[in-house]
């Protein structure tokens, strides 16, 4: 079992990365393999809505998104950590996720998703909400914790002093581990829920 950890901060030794390391330790205790994927310092452009991925099977911009998509398909869970910029995940994270989820057409159902955000002070819940929408539109259950998945820190290293925030991430990792293991057992015993043969696309006009 494997969980991919996406680091959306462009800063070395960032508070976001510290949060991922806190979760990484718990996943190791739970016997779940992890890989941290740093995207915050990458030059990742946004989606242009060309829809060529529907023909090509991958994004026309062959960068970190396509590289990560193959890892994502094989993984059991995904954690996305992002700093908060203007009450939202930073632009690189949003460009990465929009292209990743739109251009990768494999079934993401029951891969477990979790996001957390890091801010000096405010804007965390709005940014956290943005991350969760990528999971729910793809049939990915969201792992819960004891609170919204926020950590606080400005200067490098400050977030590790946010005891409640770090505890929230540890509980998140434990709950996510439990869900991944439980879904594996459920799939083996009962199978996943039946899917309807055709997706019904309905526009809001006409």
Image (cartoon, rainbow, N blue to C red):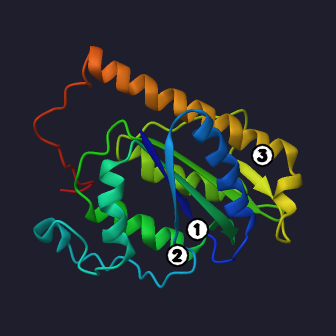
Image coordinates for residue 183, horizontal then vertical, percent: 39, 26
Residue matched to label 3: 166
Identify the element where label 3 is drawn: helix
Residue matched to label 1: 8
| Label 1 CA crowd tier, 10 Å (few <14, some 14–19, many 20+) | many
Q: Residue 92 carries which label?
A: 2
What residue is shown at x 41% (from left), y 82% (from top)? 45
Q: Which of 174 and 148 is in front in this view?
A: 174
Image coordinates for residue 143, horizontal then vertical, percent: 55, 36
Which comes before the other along the chain, label 2 or label 1? 1
What residue is shown at x 77% (from left), y 53% (from top)? 151
Answer yes or no: do the residues labelled 2 and 1 have beta carbons within 8 Å?
A: yes
Mark 2 vs mark 3, CA separation in Å: 24 Å
Mark 3 vs mark 1, CA separation in Å: 18 Å
Identify the element where label 1 is drawn: loop
| Label 2 CA crowd tier, 10 Å (few <14, some 14–19, many 20+) | many
Q: Quadrant of residue 157?
A: bottom right
Q: Which mark is residue 37?
A: none
What residue is shown at x 37% (from left), y 64% (from top)? 68
Give above or below for 79 relative to 185: below
Query: In screen coordinates, is 126 left or right of 78?
Result: right
What residue is shown at x 44% (from left), y 47% (from top)? 135
Identify the element where label 2 is drawn: helix
Name the quadrant of the C terminus: bottom left
Q: In which quarter of the image is residue 187?
A: top left
Answer yes or no: do the residues labelled 3 and 1 have beta carbons within 8 Å?
A: no
| In the image, farthest residue toward the top | 189
Image coordinates for residue 141, horizontal then vertical, percent: 45, 36
């Amino acid at each position: 079992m494997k969980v991919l950890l996406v680091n959306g901060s462009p800063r070395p030794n960032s508070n976001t990365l510290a949060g991922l390391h806190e979760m990484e330790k718990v996943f190791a205790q739970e016997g779940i393999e992890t890989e941290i994927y740093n995207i915050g310092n990458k030059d990742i452009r946004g989606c242009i809505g060309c829809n060529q991925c529907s023909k090509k099977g991958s994004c026309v911009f062959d960068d970190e998104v396509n590289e990560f998509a193959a890892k994502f398909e094989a993984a059991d869970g995904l954690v996305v950590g992002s700093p908060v910029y203007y009450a939202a995940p930073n632009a690189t994270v949003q460009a990465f996720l929009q292209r990743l989820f739109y251009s990768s057409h494999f079934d993401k159902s029951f891969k477990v998703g979790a996001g957390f955000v890091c801010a000096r002070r405010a804007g965390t819940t709005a940014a956290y909400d943005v991350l969760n929408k990528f999971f729910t539109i793809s049939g990915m259950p969201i792992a819960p914790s004891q609170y919204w998945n926020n950590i606080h820190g400005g200067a490098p290293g400050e977030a590790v002093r946010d005891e409640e925030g770090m505890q929230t991430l540890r509980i998140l990792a434990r709950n996510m581990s439990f869900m991944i293991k439980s879904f594996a057992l459920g799939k083996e015993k009962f199978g996943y829920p039946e899917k309807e043969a055709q997706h019904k696309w309905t526009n809001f006009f006409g």
